[in-house]
Image (spheres, grey):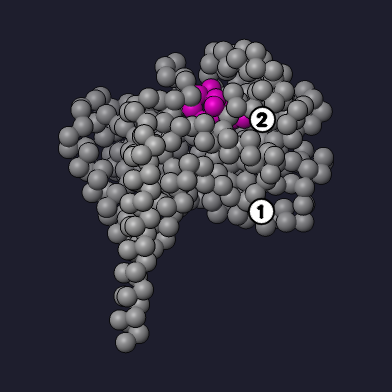
Amino acid sequence: MENKTIVITGASSGAGKATALELAPGKVNLVLAARNETALLELADECRELGADVLVLPTDVCDRTAVLELAQKAFEWKGRIDVWVNNAGVLAAGTFEETPWETHQQVINTNLLGYMSGTHAVLPFFKLQGAGILINNISIGGYVPVPYGSAYTASKYALRGFFESIKGELSSWPEIHVVDLYPAFLDTPGIQHAANYTGKVLRNAPPVSDPKVVAEAVKASILRPVSNRYPGGASKLFKLGHALAPELMVKFTSLLMRGYFKSADAIAKTDGNIFNTVDYSMSTNGNARPRLSKRTRQRLTAGLVLLGVSLLAIKMLTGKKKLA
């Protein structure tokens, strides 16, 4: 880890901030990028105290010129870029037609085009060096749709396909690695920063993992790059459930969300941090609700495994009946 130059977008809070703090003790060179310069400067001080050298470059990933400058300045700082972490992302909640069209566009601009822009900017440096690691925090949303978050879902599904394509292109570059991370729900401030057109308070759905699981996955991916990782474990079960019974899972998720909206507290509609940064809740954790105890996580995992087995059995029986 020592002396590796690592760029992290969306580093001002949540999983990005947790990643910076996880990597800093390794005496790395951190390039911290996000829209909120004040939050980045505070994080930079923390990382320096932990042993890292830090460069702060305020960047909006929707600004193509800014992303190109981020890559160029990061390379010039230490003479190379070893790792690029695509992490900046936003969320907008609400029915598709009631969410402003401009908001849908901005979600795509940030979550999809922002990752594509970062990739487009850093790959020439990786190829110049003959090596590099590109890590993408995609989320299980790349496999499992989020009702009332349609643009978010569109961006995540598209990211999965995009990076699979890039992996194919880079197959002749054995020292350039692309690692996709698919965590489930994280206890980050992202839910508090989200654009919200539901008129109801948003909360993370259990099981909720500490964003540290993403930070640890990033570190593991630097030390041992693999194509895909599923931080927190629960995301593999969600992926399995959707693969076995996609329609059932989507209907069940939608039913749960509608039930929640009926009882949730009312709140004013907001654009959140979609178009501009915010100056509140810039920590690693959101603390929107208590994280699950170890026993509760075990029970939920057992329940999801049982659900997956049941769905597989139903699918197999249905297939036999059709053949008969």
From this view, report whether residue 200 is shown above or below residue 138: above
- Please report the bounds of the magenta region as a residue range: 7-18
- Mark 2 is surrounded, within 10 Å at the Cα level, by few (under 14), some (14 to 19) or many (20 or more) other residues, namely many
Quadrant in which the N terminus is drawn: top right
Q: Quadrant location of residue 305?
A: bottom left
Give residue 24's position: percent from left, percent from top: 65, 23
Q: Amino acid at mark 2?
A: Val
Residue under numbered circle 2: 7
Give residue 160's position: percent from left, percent from top: 54, 51
In reply to whether residue 16 is colored magenta, the answer given is: yes
What numbered label is drawn on residue 167? 1
Q: Cα distance, mark 1 to mark 2? A: 20 Å
Q: Is residue 162 left or right of residue 170?
A: left
Q: Earlier in the sequence, mark 1 or mark 2?
A: 2
Q: Is residue 146 left or right of residue 226?
A: left
What numbered label is drawn on residue 210? none
From this view, report whether residue 201 is shown above or below residue 299: above
From this view, report whether residue 34 is shown above or below residue 136: above
In reply to whether residue 223 is colored magenta, the answer given is: no
- Mark 1 is surrounded, within 10 Å at the Cα level, by few (under 14), some (14 to 19) or many (20 or more) other residues, namely some
Image point 22% across, 38% down: which residue? 260
Seen from the viewer's position, the closer of residues 174 and 289 is: 289
